[in-house]
Image (cartoon, rainbow, N blue to C red):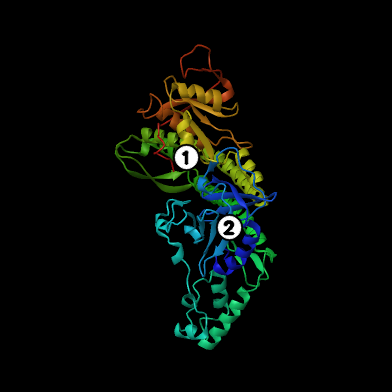
Amino acid sequence: MHFNYHFLKFLIPALVKKFVGMEIMECFSQNKDELVVGCSGQNEEAYIRANLLPSVSCLAFPDGFKRSKKNTVSLFPELIGKKIMAIDPIKFERAFLIKLSDNSSLLFKLHGTRSNILYYHSGSKTPGLLFRNELKDDKEILINELAKELTLDYETFQSLEGNASKFLPTLGKIPREWLKTNGYLEVGLAEKWHLMTNLLDMLESPLYQIVQLGNEYLLNLLPSPDSLFQTEDPIKACNELFRYRVVIQAFEKEKNHWLKQLEDQKKRTAAYIHKTTHKLELLENEISPSQTADIIMANLHQIERGQEEIELLNFYSGKQEFFKLKRDQTPQKYAENLYRKSKNRKKETEQLFQNLIEKEKLLDQTTSWIEEIKEFDDFRSLRDFIKRNHLTPKSKGQEDQVPYKRFEIEGFEILVGKSAKGNDELLRNFAWKEDLWLHAKDVSGSHVLIKHRSGINFPKTVIERAAELAAYYSKNKNDSLAPVIYTPSKYVRKIKGSAPGAVMVDKESVLMVPPKGPQEEVT
């Protein structure tokens, strides 16, 4: 409730004492929706720092401010050299007015997400300049029509039937909640008036606290046992709230963002482990296709051509069982297909086991990251950690400027060269020796890199998906199956004078995959 008339009427006298008589020396912005006004007088400096970002609107009045050398722009040149002659509250309104030496004025309209700063030239009824130009309706604001007249007596309260919002529309979130908590909605008119007068008495007490409600930090004028900060100085209260809302709240928001991402990844990984473990159990308990093939081959003399089902002795279980056959295949051909299926099932089982190992490593890594992030209490530690572990995806703008397309598969960053020259640049500037390099075999195509992640081996599923992309971005794009070579980047080198994209590979492995583009994600 710092942007509230009940607080502003205490804040304005303190601002008058601090700023009146000072000359405005600079006015600039170096962050979105933030304006800084620098003032000087009698060997002292003071600043008005207004952060009007809708999510964290607040004011601060520091004694010093170091302007950045980059990403800063000067604003409101009309203010420079003017003296602050007066600072006036606007009755029962979330706003105050700074009057300047040339009779121009600066209006701070503090309306939550629609807060703005308006400059009025001398003698002008409407603003000539707005800080947030997107709030077009503010161009019609007349200063002399902002003030409200409220009669706060029992007769008015009675005529409004105790409606708190109509009686005192300047009440903020915390006072309204205080009334509700104390039974305001359930009691009669006399008791409501008693609660309202008690509330008004507390709002007249110059004691300011910072409290936390959910993920938001607020200034509170009511007694609270859970305050994070308490002062009788309204400027100190503003400055401390600014720190909580702009620095701490922003940090916690970013921290919670990463925690949620990692918790989601942890949940997905745990679900994959559960699903894959169940699938492996089913595969291990099923009769192997090769066993069925053995039984069919041992009983070929009993099977007639075109037969679709036959009862035979299963010499693995010692029981008579029915076995299905294919009418359009000979028993030998059907058995051959079963042997092939059994071989593929063995490969599938091995791959699932390998995937399970990698996913368990990822789960452990993700759990460890979550615990590490929970301990961070400043931006630098958090952002260093995010950068060190390659958790930040590139923005679309960055992607447009780099020589590769970027994909993410199971937490691994995949880079695909955009052109022959882009392939060279990808290998020269973006490849590390432990990254995995892939390319369609014996044809032209994009270089593909799987970026190395410390302590985690490349899962087979990730290698296969990257290989499918390598095949897709090559001359083999339309083949049903395509060979793709892969090797650590340290075994790939550029020969001086060779054509763009051409390289020498000293050691390689080959994988057969169907070409699949980014829109054909495997499930």
Q: Secondary structure at mark 2?
A: strand
Q: What type is the residue that disc 1 sits on?
A: Gln
Q: What type is the residue that disc 2 sits on?
A: Met
Q: Secondary structure at mark 1?
A: helix
Q: Which label belongs to residue 291?
A: 1
Q: Which label belongs to residue 331?
A: none
| Figure label count | 2
Q: Is residue 185 above or below residue 15?
A: below
Q: Residue at x 62, y 65 (%)?
A: 13
Check disc 2 and report the residue beneath it.
85
Q: Quadrant of the N terminus?
A: bottom right
How far across and down, in percent of the image, does residue 239 sit? 64, 57
Q: Quadrant of residue 295?
A: top left
Earlier residue among tags 1 and 2: 2
Q: Residues within 10 Å of mark 1 (few under 14, many from 20)?
A: some
Q: Residue furthest top?
A: 497
How far across and down, in percent of the image, does residue 422 sit? 47, 24
